[in-house]
Image: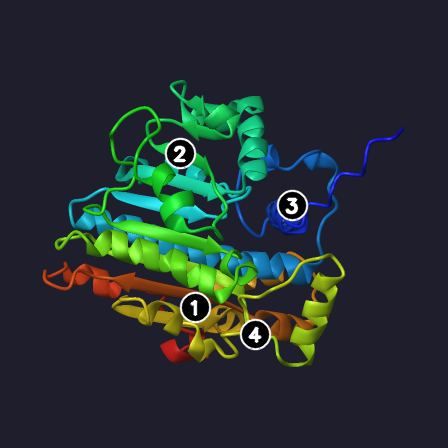
Amino acid sequence: MLPPPRPADPDNSIRLTDNDAAIARLSAVNKQYISDPFIKSLVPRAHLQPSRPPLINIGTHVRTTAIDDLVQQWVQISSQTGQTCQIVSLGAGSDTRYWRLATGPHKNMISAYIEIDFMENTTKKIMAIRKSKELSAVVGPEARLALGGTALHSSVYHLLPADLRETPATALAPLITIADDSSKLCLDPSIPTLLLFECVLVYMSPESSSTLIQWFSDYFSKLPQHAPLGAIVYEMFGLEDSFGRVMINNLKARNVTLPGAAPYPTVESLPSRFLNLKFTAANALTLRVIRNRYIAPQELDRIAKLEFLDEVEELDLVLEHYAITWSIMLPVNAKADPAWGRWSLTEKPRPEEDGNF
């Protein structure tokens, strides 16, 4: 008698979206849109992966450039104020940011880098790290496994398994606040801390994402003199139009839904996610606006020479449905360093604005 069929894993389709993102990033690297020497170690059979269309490569470039800018600013401002900082990447998947920061000019300014994702994803990433000399060398020889091989700890880097949709007090707090083998805090509210949500919250219910952000807000607020808490969100939004409906239907065919998109029909609505939860300030821009106004013209010229793009209108339509939101929560009863008020994307002058025609 054959064993009964195993029930389908409803989250497998969501986890597979990380594969899509990793291959898109690898394509952008291979085509020289961005630089990332570590992504190939996290993509199975990287040398056999086909390139993605120019439209995808450009979108990856815009997303990467803007988020890199905000993260680098966070680290630099922390340094200017005489502090190290912490970064918590939620739904990190195959992200390589820790390795890029740990081999960059500000590597000593990161006191803790925490990645959290499904147990299946953390297990897969641990295997890739142990297999790759490049990845394991950066993590360091002191790295140790935990939680049955689903977690990894080093002096700075922590990779932890959790379902972010579950109640943070039970699913997240035990992992992120206490190291598994000591009483040392993994997450210190007295140190500037940046939360990263790259295509994560849109897959969660609005209630779950609000509860998750609220947990971090409450955790920091308990310390009256807490350090700045920042957040960066990258995701799709405004999906009520014809383009959005096509996107939703295409994803439904892959058993992927976007419950987190409904409350945010416009880019102006995106900051409310944080302003309603004690955050001091929040801003959001579409990738289209970022590409047109917030990336240096010289860089756009370089990108334009890499591949021929005959889908400019389609590119603008796609970029108009993705946005980056950044927000910050400052202590209420303490004067924060004014440098934190400058944490933001800034417009880059266009040639005509310089008087050069």
Q: Indicate how the structure is coloured in the image.
A: rainbow
Question: Mark 1 or 2 closer to N-term?
Answer: 2
C-alpha separation, residue under disc 1 versus residue under disc 2: 32 Å
C-alpha separation, residue under disc 3 versus residue under disc 4: 23 Å
Quadrant housing residue 40: top right
Circle number at residue 158: 2
Label 2 Cα crowd, 10 Å radius (few <14 / some 14-19 / many 20+): many
- Element marked by disc 3: helix
Q: Which residue is mark 1?
A: 294
Q: Nearer the viewer, residue 208 or 352?
A: 208
Residue shown at the point (69%, 80%) measured from the top left = 242
Vertical side of 124 occupied by 334: above or below? below
Q: Which residue is mark 3?
A: 19
C-alpha separation, residue under disc 4 versus residue under disc 2: 34 Å
Residue shown at the point (45%, 55%) measured from the top left = 197
Label 1 sits on what residue type? Tyr
Residue shown at the point (53%, 42%) measured from the top left = 36
Question: Mark 1 or 4 closer to N-term?
Answer: 1
Pair 1/2: label in front: 2
Pair 3/4: label in front: 3
Q: Which residue is mark 4?
A: 320
